[in-house]
């Protein structure tokens, strides 16, 4: 066959190029553009170079909320991943009970973020909320609006309630994909329950766990609505996480240049940590 | 090691079995003796694997008992029955090395590591996978994986029995033969009761001393390869064993014998007498292609048939002939020549002509 070179074929790439440009490149470059200027008003921008970045990196408020953010995401992963795996292991394998469990698990995932915040805001109140009132009448001094630890625990509990089902569902699907023969062989080999988990279930859950860890890390690292509705970032700034700090800066103070530099740093942190996770988990095997 | 006795065993996969068709295993009584090498032979779906899983304890029989050395073990798990089983498709633990895979069954029962080490190396040597011991098991080829799978069964010296569920399905023909020999050697060396499930008669007869042929959820015959060949107890055994299988012809009662079409086949007085006693009309005669004698010379006891086809298979020939309306196969030696379309004279030696009533062999008492 005679091949005819025709460079007009490049036009076929155009739709994808336009799509990517509008969905990612143009918004991102706008932010980059803002991050190197000081903007007083429409058409009144002045070139400032890397000044915003230097200032943001030295900003104590931001450093604090970055640390809080890491602590929160770490706690979320430490609780939700093992809990999600345990829930998936305990779920029935088939039948009406399995369907029922799946529906129950899916419910929290279907509730909008600000509704989740509102639910827990009321649920945790000492006067009319069942949770807060219950704890108080049991003699526990619980007040999430005034006490830092209580506020933290409530935000964490809310996130666990909202997102553990996602981890559990992912793991459940991974567990169902393990052929029955493996369990039979393990039984013949007289493996203990723990050995079955450690050597059969866990290795075969690896790929879904990579997805679960990445999703939960990214989502928890970008959390905004729920703590904003529940505690408003307080008491003080004890539950003010990164995105709330950013929003305050960008919208509250209309500090677009600084907020843009902040956004870029934020984005790079998420990217970096996700990459680290992914590389670490996928290379776990080869190191042995 | 143990003697395994299956007592009036029946199993159905449905909750409320309504008829015999719902049963995968039907009223089966059988004894696998201590230290024997057995094959369980039968077509797909005849209940072989079900029976194996019942012996190992992966499945609870709906009726009947499983006895190990006379002790009922129905309620015991595979762990407590101390039994090894190798599955049709290799099951290996992906995250472990070959060594760890082989050591796994021993480690689970707390065998000291020096003993584990020795035993694993011994089995790896027999299976010729010593060089792979420190490789990740998931990087092996299919047949090496299956060797590892088998090794996990063989590594436990103290098992009641080792059950093989068509273990060589995924293996190349060349290696198949070698591995079968290996298993036989291992059997001779360790003297463990082994039950080997297969649908391949050659595989069964090279591995086992005695073969159980299973059909429709029942064991229809249990005997040596020679017995199965010369004295098939059931029409299915005749048909399934041998290549090609036994010629089976549906016949009616006739004076002094049986007949089909216009052909009358005389039977011994004893066989005629048996036929008079039974009421069933399901009567068949069977003779193996190897035992039909073909020649050009007509005699008193010969039947004339027409040659339809002759296939040369290298070391022997298979001739297809038409006798009345029945098509029969005859095995010829390389130096026998018959032309297609010609007539041929056949004789059926009395010793090899078998009579079946309701599919089961009518035994001749004086033999």
Image (cartoon, coloured by chain):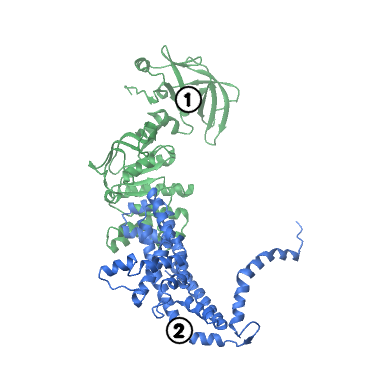
Chain colours: A blue, B green
Between B162 and A256, the residue placed more toward the observer is A256
- Residue that lies at the very extreme toward the front in this rendered image: A127
- Residue that lies at the very extreme toward the top in this rendered image: B255
Gap in angstroms between the C-alphas marked 1 and 2:
101 Å
Q: Quadrant of residue A29?
A: bottom right
Residue B292 — which label?
1
Residue that appears at 60% across and 71% down: A24
According to the picture, the residue beneath numbered tag 2 turns out to be A61
**Residue A147 visible, this angle:** yes
Q: Is residue B114 left or right of residue A227?
A: left
Q: Is residue B364 above or below residue B47?
A: above
Q: Secondary structure at mark 2?
A: helix
Residue A19 percent coordinates (x, y): 64, 66
Residue that appears at 44% across and 56% down: A173
**Residue B132 visible, this angle:** no
Q: Is residue B152 above or below residue B217?
A: below
Q: Chain of mark 2?
A: A
Between B81 and B363, the residue placed more toward the observer is B81
Mark 2 crowdedness (10 Å alpha carbons): few <14, some 14-19, many ≥20: some
Mark 1 crowdedness (10 Å alpha carbons): few <14, some 14-19, many ≥20: some
Residue B331 percent coordinates (x, y): 50, 29
């Amino acid at each position: 066959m005679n091949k005819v070179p025709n460079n007009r074929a490049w036009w076929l790439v155009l739709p994808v190029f336009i799509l990517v440009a509008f969905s990612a490149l143009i918004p991102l470059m706008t932010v980059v553009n803002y991050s190197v200027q000081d903007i007083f008003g429409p058409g009144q921008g002045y070139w400032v170079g890397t000044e915003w970045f230097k200032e943001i990196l030295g900003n104590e408020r931001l450093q604090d909320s970055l640390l809080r953010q890491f602590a929160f995401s770490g706690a979320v992963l430490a609780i939700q991943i093992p809990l999600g795996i345990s829930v998936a292991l305990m779920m029935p394998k088939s039948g009406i009970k399995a369907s029922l469990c799946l529906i129950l698990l899916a419910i929290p995932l279907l509730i909008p973020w600000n509704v989740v915040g509102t639910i827990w805001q009321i649920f945790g109140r000492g006067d009319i909320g069942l949770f807060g009132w219950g704890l108080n009448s049991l003699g526990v001094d619980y007040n999430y609006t005034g006490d830092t630890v209580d506020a933290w625990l409530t935000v964490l509990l809310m996130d666990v309630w909202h997102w553990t089902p996602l981890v559990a569902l992912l793991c459940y699907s991974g567990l169902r994909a393990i052929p029955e023969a493996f369990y039979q062989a393990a039984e013949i080999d007289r493996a203990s329950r723990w050995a079955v988990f450690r050597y059969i279930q866990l290795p075969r859950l690896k790929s879904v766990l990579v997805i679960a860890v990445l999703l939960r890390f990214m989502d928890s690292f970008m959390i905004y609505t729920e703590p904003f509705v529940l505690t408003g970032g307080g008491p003080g700034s004890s539950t003010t996480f990164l995105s709330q700090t950013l929003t305050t800066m960008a919208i509250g103070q209309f500090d677009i240049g600084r907020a843009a530099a902040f956004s870029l740093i934020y984005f790079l942190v998420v990217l970096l940590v996700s990459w680290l996770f992914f590389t670490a988990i996928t290379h776990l095997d080869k190191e042995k | 090691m143990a003697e395994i006795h299956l007592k009036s065993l029946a199993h159905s996969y449905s909750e409320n079995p309504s008829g015999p068709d719902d049963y995968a295993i039907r009223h089966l009584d059988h004894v696998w003796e201590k230290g024997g090498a057995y094959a369980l032979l039968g077509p797909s779906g005849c209940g072989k694997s079900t029976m194996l899983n019942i012996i190992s304890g992966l499945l609870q029989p709906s009726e009947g008992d499983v006895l190990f050395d006379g002790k009922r073990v129905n309620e015991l798990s595979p762990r407590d029955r101390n039994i090894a089983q190798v599955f049709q498709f290799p099951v290996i633990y992906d995250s472990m090395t070959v060594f760890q895979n082989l050591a796994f069954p021993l480690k689970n029962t707390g065998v000291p590591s020096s003993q584990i080490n020795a035993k694993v190396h011994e089995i790896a040597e027999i299976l010729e996978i010593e060089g792979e011991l420190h490789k990740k098991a998931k990087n092996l080829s299919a047949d090496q994986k299956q060797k590892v799978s088998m090794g996990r069964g063989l590594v436990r010296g103290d098992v009641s029995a080792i059950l093989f569920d068509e273990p060589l399905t995924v293996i190349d023909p060349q290696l198949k033969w070698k591995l079968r020999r290996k298993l036989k050697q291992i059997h001779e060396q360790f003297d463990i009761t082994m039950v080997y499930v297969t649908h391949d008669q050659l595989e069964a007869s090279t591995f086992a001393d005695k073969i159980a042929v299973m059909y429709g959820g029942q064991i229809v015959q249990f005997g040596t390869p020679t017995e199965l060949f010369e004295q098939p107890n059931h029409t299915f055994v005749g048909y399934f064993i041998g290549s090609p299988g036994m010629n089976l012809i549906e016949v009616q009662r006739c004076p002094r014998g049986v007949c089909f079409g216009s052909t009358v086949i005389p039977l011994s007085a004893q066989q005629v007498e048996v036929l008079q006693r039974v009421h069933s009309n399901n009567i068949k005669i069977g003779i193996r292609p190897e035992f039909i004698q073909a020649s050009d010379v007509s005699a008193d006891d010969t039947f004339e048939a027409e040659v339809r086809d002759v296939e040369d298979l290298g070391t022997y020939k298979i001739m297809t002939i038409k006798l009345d309306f029945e098509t029969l196969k005859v095995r010829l030696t390389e130096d026998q020549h018959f032309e297609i379309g010609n007539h041929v004279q056949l004789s059926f030696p009395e010793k090899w002509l078998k009579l079946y009533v309701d599919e089961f062999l009518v035994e001749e008492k004086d033999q």
